[in-house]
Amino acid sequence: MSRIKQVAKQASQQGRKLLIPYLVAGDPDLSTTLALMHVLVDQGADIIELGIPFSDPSSDGPVIQRGVERALSKGVTLQNVLNLVAEFRQSNENTPIVLMGYLNPIEIMGYASFVENAASAGVDGVLVVDMPTTESEQLHGLLQEREIDTIYLVAPTTRDERLETICSHTSGYLYYVSLKGVTGAALTDYESVAANIAKLRERSDLPIVIGFGIKDADSAKAMGSLSDGVIIGSALVEQIAKLSDQTNPNETILAQTTDVIKVAREALDSI
Amino acid sequence: MVKNVKIDTESSGAENNQGKFDGPDASGHFGPYGGVFVGETLVAAVEELAAVYEEISDDKEFWDEYDSQLKYYVGRPSPLYFAQRLTQSSGGAKIYLKREDLNHTGAHKVNNTIGQALLAKRMGKTRIIAETGAGQHGVATATVAARLGLECHVYMGADDIVRQAPNVFRMKLLGANVVAVKSGSRTLKDAMNEAMRDWATNVDNTYYIIGTVAGPHPYPKLVRDFQCVIGREAREQSLEQIGRLPDALVACVGGGSNAIGLFYPFLKDESVAMYGVEAGGHGIDTGEHAAPLSAGVPGVLHGNRTYLMTDKAGQILETHSISAGLDYPGVGPEHSWLKDLNRVTYVDATDSEAMEAFHQLTRLEGIIPALESSHAIAYGTKLAAKMGKDKNLIINLSGRGDKDIETIARIEGITL
């Protein structure tokens, strides 16, 4: 059983909501990211989404754009991100890692070597923001062969007939984008989220998690009660930004940085 | 009536080329290039646009309206002008200029914005957004938005705003909100990222007028179709004025809309050679250029797979060109396909070659060309020199150079 499936199954048995932090790999540097990943697990993260830095993140808002720029200023590459996962795996066998990013770095590495490297590093899922199902056949097939989950986004604008396709392609979990816009925008329309989640439930047994715009206890609780879990990205990356002038931040500082995840864990556990 | 471009197949080699030049396919691909690589939020919007475009492709009323606006508002057809002194100075083939610089707003860009504004109107969108590099597309968009009374926001790299101050002021006069983009390299590609973010946020009421033959399907196709008026006219004018088809076509290539507009109606005429001129910047060897077809590799950016300037880790490289309109790391996917098919030869002209051509055309013909078009002039005159005097060459003069005079003055150390 894949790690993601294992974690989702346990959570569902325990009535626990999934908490998935997103951070940009290499922001502010690779060793800090590695340290943060372990702290996030301690704070109650169930799965970690690791952003692959890309020069043109056209689906991301300003907070994550700046995180990406910080990573790129250190020259972080896709190969570095894969090495980071391998290093994390040396001391953590259980927490699933999902790589999230844009297609070009993967195209340039080559699909086959990307998938090979991801599998041996211990990557569990891949979410390519600018690769809809219609363009994903080849990469998806290769990921499937190595039992890596391919995760697709579902947006408020996704039409019903596409829902079928996305549900049948996705494994791991379904990622529902809570709003029309970019990462980190303000989430306002709770009602439409509830209606769209219901539509997804009719079509899939996979865990459904909600991302974009979740930034504190209230929004985590609101979205968590509509779904199987939440993804928190910009609110965390905004805190990580404060680490950029620190060398080797200590445990206390790291815990402060990831406090938003601890707070969200408590909010989700109170549902 | 102008319709989805139907190419005459009278030339002898037409059968051999059957199909190759008829792209894109139903899913928006030109061979391996093109496609729809966008975030899920935008998938429905591009699918809706593709459906509406399909619907109007045989709608006489739509195309009559488009034709009428090109005639009475833009001032088409643009002349095919025999550049006698430029020809004499080059010493070879007869050089003709397709005068897109004479269009309303001063460049070919308006052919496309007129068409897309009609689409926006038909789709009931009330808000227009666009990206711009040199500002020509921004001005052409602000112009049609003003005319239709639509709200208009133009995204422009902060560095380009400095380079192209007159066009920025022109857009503001036309009532557009010009948004300075300060992320990334602060040029055209970053403006396009920001426009895509705006589109995802305001997708319900917003129409995104992309200025070139790039972006997700159906943009490369529909922008091409709107620009093909250039090549259709040039073909007719050539038959009428020269008495036969030209021997070669030359156009500058940034995203590639003026080039594809000129080339497409001639693609099946095997006797017509075609040259796309990319921005060589300081020289291809220096790495400081904007020539993905000459020096790049296939990758994915801004919704389509195409040749890109990217490093070994897949990061998009910063580009350099004297001309803001060519300063883009990608290129329309159809050009990538035409390169692989060897139908079009892609070459480059450097900053200094473009500058020299700028002055040459200005002094010899009394026409001040845009710096973008100056790249085509630079290569076109070299090419003409190598061709016999009985040959004919058409260079697409895609825009006028009034917007560039400050840049030229600055580079040459002149205070205005």
Image (cartoon, coloured by chain):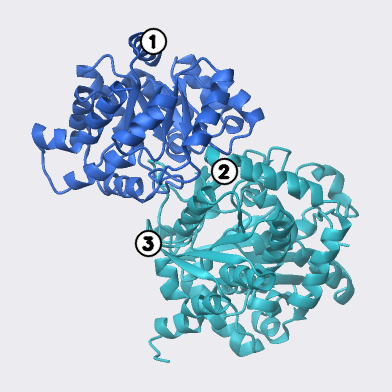
Chain A: give its colour: blue
In terms of depth relative to the viewer, which is nearer, A226 or B354? A226
Residue B251: which quarter of the image?
bottom right
Viewed as shown, does residue B75 lie left or right of B397?
Answer: right
Q: Residues within 10 Å of mark 2 (few under 14, many from 20)?
A: many
Residue receiving disc 1: A9
| Quadrant, the C terminus of chain B | bottom left
Q: Nearer the viewer, mark 1 or mark 3?
A: 1
Q: Position of residue B221 (x, y in %)?
A: 70, 51
Residue receiving disc 2: B42
Circles 3 and 2 on the same chain: yes
Q: Position of residue A126 (x, y in %)?
A: 43, 27
Tell me if residue B211 can be seen: no
In terms of depth relative to the viewer, which is nearer, A148 or A21? A21
- Marker disc for residue B182: 3
Image position of B119 with respect to B143: above or below = above
Q: Tag 3's secondary structure?
A: loop
Circles 1 and 3 on the same chain: no
Residue B382: which quarter of the image?
bottom right
Q: Tag 2's secondary structure?
A: helix
Q: Amino acid at mark 1?
A: Lys
